[in-house]
Image (cartoon, grey):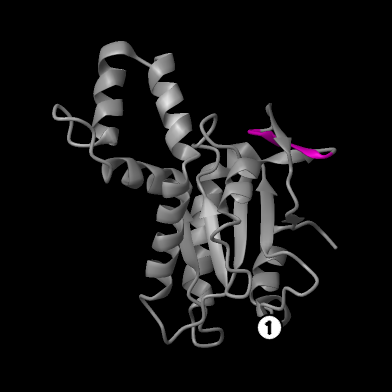
């Protein structure tokens, strides 16, 4: 599916309807990893164009990695460090990328508290412009979360908080599908693709 085709689909009333009686509300749009910066700019354009009077759609934009850093910074950690994020940054200065830091980041990325933090942020963003529609949540930054949290792990863990009747969650994935698995950055095997709907040419 081209960028133009994706925009047309997002702008269509049929796709905006949140009738999930037949289909799940998780979607994945894949793009070449070397187009990362172009895709970020494109998502900003999508948000700007969809909110115009012809559509009145306010897309909820969520960078998963930035949100993870915010979450870590909100978590106190002992007396020496301001937060878990501060601890991680200081340890990386001292030791580089140690196994201990990697284990801590992986553990925190899989915690229910982090998923709840993500959900609460989505709710907060949806309340900022209540007079507009919020049919879409754009989730990006999944590549920056590797190897601490994979796409299928995030989607599975978020099910507890997922409100299928409220919006469609569209995860933007830098890579491609290979059989039943995804290949992150077109290089790294990323396990099973989960039960999401892949946005491809129809």
Q: Over which residues does the magenta segment extend?
A: 180-185
Question: Measured from the top left, where is residue 198 in percent x and y?
Answer: 75, 54
Q: Is residue 168 above or below residue 74?
A: below
Q: Is residue 181 left or right of residue 155?
A: right
Q: Is residue 85 magenta-colored?
A: no
Q: Is residue 11 left or right of residue 23?
A: left
- According to the picture, the residue beneath numbered tag 1 turns out to be 13
Q: Is residue 182 magenta-colored?
A: yes
Q: Is residue 153 above or below residue 1?
A: above
> At 31% across and 12% down in the image, what residue appears?
95
Q: Is residue 26 above or below residue 156?
A: below
Question: Measured from the top left, where is residue 68 in percent x and y?
Answer: 40, 44
Q: Which element is circle 1 on? A: helix
Main SS, magenta residues = strand
Give the quarter of the figure containing the N terminus.
bottom right
Q: Residue furthest left?
A: 79
Q: Residue furthest top?
A: 95
């Amino acid at each position: 599916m081209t960028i133009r085709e994706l925009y047309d689909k997002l702008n269509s009333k049929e796709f905006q309807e949140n009738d999930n009686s037949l289909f799940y509300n998780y979607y994945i749009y894949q793009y070449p990893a070397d187009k990362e910066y172009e895709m970020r700019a494109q998502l900003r354009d999508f948000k700007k164009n969809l909110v115009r009077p012809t559509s009145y759609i306010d897309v909820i934009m969520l960078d998963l990695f930035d949100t993870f850093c915010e979450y870590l910074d909100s978590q106190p950690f002992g007396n020496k460090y301001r937060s878990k994020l501060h601890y991680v940054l200081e340890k990386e200065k001292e030791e580089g990328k140690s196994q201990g830091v990697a284990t801590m980041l992986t553990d925190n990325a899989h915690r229910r508290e982090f998923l709840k933090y993500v959900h609460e942020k989505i709710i907060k963003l949806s309340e900022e412009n209540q007079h507009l529609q919020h049919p879409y949540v754009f989730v990006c930054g999944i590549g920056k979360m590797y190897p601490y949290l994979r796409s299928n792990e995030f989607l599975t863990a978020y099910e507890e908080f997922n409100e299928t009747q409220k919006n469609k969650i569209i995860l933007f994935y830098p890579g491609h599908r290979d059989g039943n698995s995804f290949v992150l950055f077109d290089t790294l095997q990323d396990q099973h693709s989960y039960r999401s709907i892949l946005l491809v040419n129809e």
